[in-house]
Structures are given as structure tokens and as C-alpha cells.
Image (tube, helix red, strand yellow):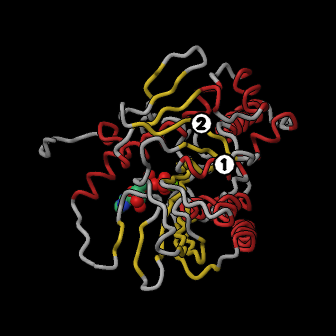
Amino acid sequence: MDDTKRTELEELGEFGLIERISNNFSNKQPSTILGIGDDAAIIDTGDAYMVISTDLLTEGIHFDLAYFPLKHLGYKAVAVNVSDIAAMNAIPTQITVSIAVSNRFSLQAIDEFYAGVKAACAHYAIDLVGGDTSSSAAGVFVSVTAIGTVAKDLVTRRSGAKNKDIICATGDLGGAYMGMQVLAREKQVFMANPDMQPQLEAYEYVVGRQLKPEARMDIIHELRELNIVPTSMIDISDGLASELLHLSRQSGLGMRVFEEQLPIDNQTYESAVEFKLDPVTCVLNGGEDYELLFTIGQQDYEKLKKHADIHFIGYVEKEDDRPGLVTKSGNWVPLQAQGWSHFKQ
Ligand code: ADP
Ligand code: MG
């Protein structure tokens, strides 16, 4: 890349930019087991591993305060970080929360936000142990760092998938994206005519997926009880296609998933059709569902096959290292990640 001329960030994309930053640094501490590039970093603390992950939520990019209640924002900011800890097969223990707000914010608004943080701390059994508070010239910024712990032999990276492993996805996908579409539409209607009340009853599930995501710690605990350690894992924050590409690239293997196995809720499907969107595209590229995508060895299939909330969507293969989707009509199409924040707003 020519450094003498201005380069637009769009040319690199989010992942290209992260790669460029990470290529410029190398780890010196023996306790740094895994640095940039997974859902969380892995630090050796002696007996166990500590995992640590940070996310930044920006007003206007990740949320719109016109339809995002502050209490939900507080909860979601914690949940999305806990989700990254879950993706390492770890148990969250502490968080720090940093906020920057402008003077259009009241004390009551901050209280609402922290009521959400508190509810999440109670739900995930974690402690708020620090943070930072600042003013902002424009917009709200929320940054959460989550810390977790995991036995050394249980930690799960993105890079561990093996040939012929089964690819599993929890819950259902595409709902959070459709929830955002509904909320954005109701906001437009409201702005055009403030007397109109939002019509959300028929979209309760998808709107809930957007406003109240839950990290799948329940699945992590269940896998432990069943003595299953996924071979690789990632949480589904950017969309299934993007996450499959990460697992594939970092494991150095192909991934084949089947359209007819993709989990989609009825309401997600119906609302996608209503919005003239392809439901499969919503599942593949919607993002923000915070479900888990993981691979298991075939020997573990028996133990999971009756699980109501774990779906077997495909398998890992070494014959073709490109991730692809087999459509209902039997065609193979390569999976593509969306560009920079393509679906986020
Ligand atoms: P996730 O979606 O799981 O939160 P990201 O795609 O945000 O993961 O980040 C991927 C990896 O890149 C993580 O290891 C993260 O810590 C790292 N990362 C992201 N942004 C930066 C940055 N500005 N500087 C250093 N590391 C970064
Ligand atoms: Mg993640």
C-alpha cells in the first residue's frame, strides 16, 4: 500500500484495518497466550487462563436513542461482551464500563443505563469493577471490557476446527437485523407524524432480538455438563457468513453449510418477506444475534443431537477451503462477508 497518498478506510475494511494494526505489534510477554484476532485475548494466570474482550458501542452506528431504551442499551453493552467470553468457552467474572455522554443527558438517563448494566451483572453473575467517565462533544459512547476464566484444556479458539467436524449454530438467526428494520421504519413513521403510535406488537420477537440480546452462557454450561469441548467457536455478532469465514480462515479449512438447515424464526421470515428482503440473506448477513457458532468432533454428535436449540448446519471439509452454502436446489455458492458495517445501519 502506498503510504504517501491518502487511503480510504473503506478500501481496507474493518478486518483489513485490524490486521494492519496487529501486524505492527508483536507480543513480548510469556503470559500472552493469544493476542489480537479471536473473540477474546488469552492470558496465562498460572492455574487457569484469563480471557479478556472489549467492545465499543457508538450512538448512530450501533444504536439510535430514538428507539433504544437506555436500560436496554446498558444490558446489551454487557451482554455482547459476555458473548465474546462465552465464545472462548469461558465463564465471565468481571466487567469495566466506560461512558462518554453530552450535556443533553440527565442524571435520570444515566441511572436508566446503569439499571440495565446492573441487571446484566446480576444475570451473568459478574462484578462491575471499574470504568471511566467522560463528556462527549456529540453522541454517546459506551465501551465495556469483560474478563472471564477458563481451565486451560477447555479454552476454545477460532482456529481449532478439524476436517469433518460438524458445524453447529445455536438459537435462530437474522431476527436482530429484522428487529432493527422494524424499529427504523417505525421511527420514520413517527417522524413524519408524531401522533402515530409505533406498531410493534406483530414484531415483538424480532424487536426483542435487537433490543434485548442474551449471551448464550446457558449453552456453555450445558456443553460442560455433557463433557463437550467445541473444536472451534465464535459468537455471531457480524452475521453467520462473516463468522464462518473467520472459522474457516483461522482453521485453514473449508466449511459447507446447507440452506435448509439454517435456523430462522417464523417472525424473522415473515417480516423479511414483508420488507422485500431475502430471509436467507438476513440469516447469513444480518448480525447482532449473539448466538454461538461452533464445531464439534463427530463423536460428540450423539450427545447433542436431541438438543432443541442447537442446529447442525453443515460440516468442515478440507477438499475445498472456501466456505460455501449449498442452496435448497443443490447449488454451491461461496459465502461472502459484507463490507464495512454494511448491515449495521
Ligand atoms: P468481535 O466481533 O468478536 O468483538 P472484532 O471483530 O471486533 O471481534 O475484533 C477481532 C479482533 O481484533 C479481536 O481480537 C479484537 O480484540 C481485535 N481488535 C479490534 N480492534 C482493535 C484495535 N483497534 N486494536 C487492537 N486490536 C483490535
Ligand atoms: Mg465475537
Vertical comparison of 273 with 317: above or below: above
Q: What is the number of the mark on residue 313?
A: 2
**Which residue type does callout 2 highlight?**
Ile
Which quarter shows the N terminus?
A: top left
Residue closest to the eye, 57 or 205: 205
Vertical comparison of 2 with 86: above or below: above
Q: Which residue corresponds to the image point at 75% horizontal and 42% vertical from the top-left? A: 207
- Contact, mark 1 vs mark 2 (Cβ under 8 Å): no
Single out the residue that lies furthest toward the bottom.
Answer: 46
Callout 2 environment at 10 Å: few (<14), some (14 to 19), or many (20+)? many
**Which residue type does callout 1 highlight?**
Glu
Q: Which residue corresponds to the image point at 58% horizontal and 82% vertical from the top-left? A: 129
- Label 2, secondary structure: give it: strand
Disc 1: which residue: 302
User: Does residue 257 appear to the left or right of 247 in the view shown?
Assistant: right
User: Does residue 116 show up?
Assistant: yes
Q: Position of residue 181 (x, y in %)?
A: 67, 34
Which quarter shows the C terminus?
A: top right
Q: How many marks?
A: 2
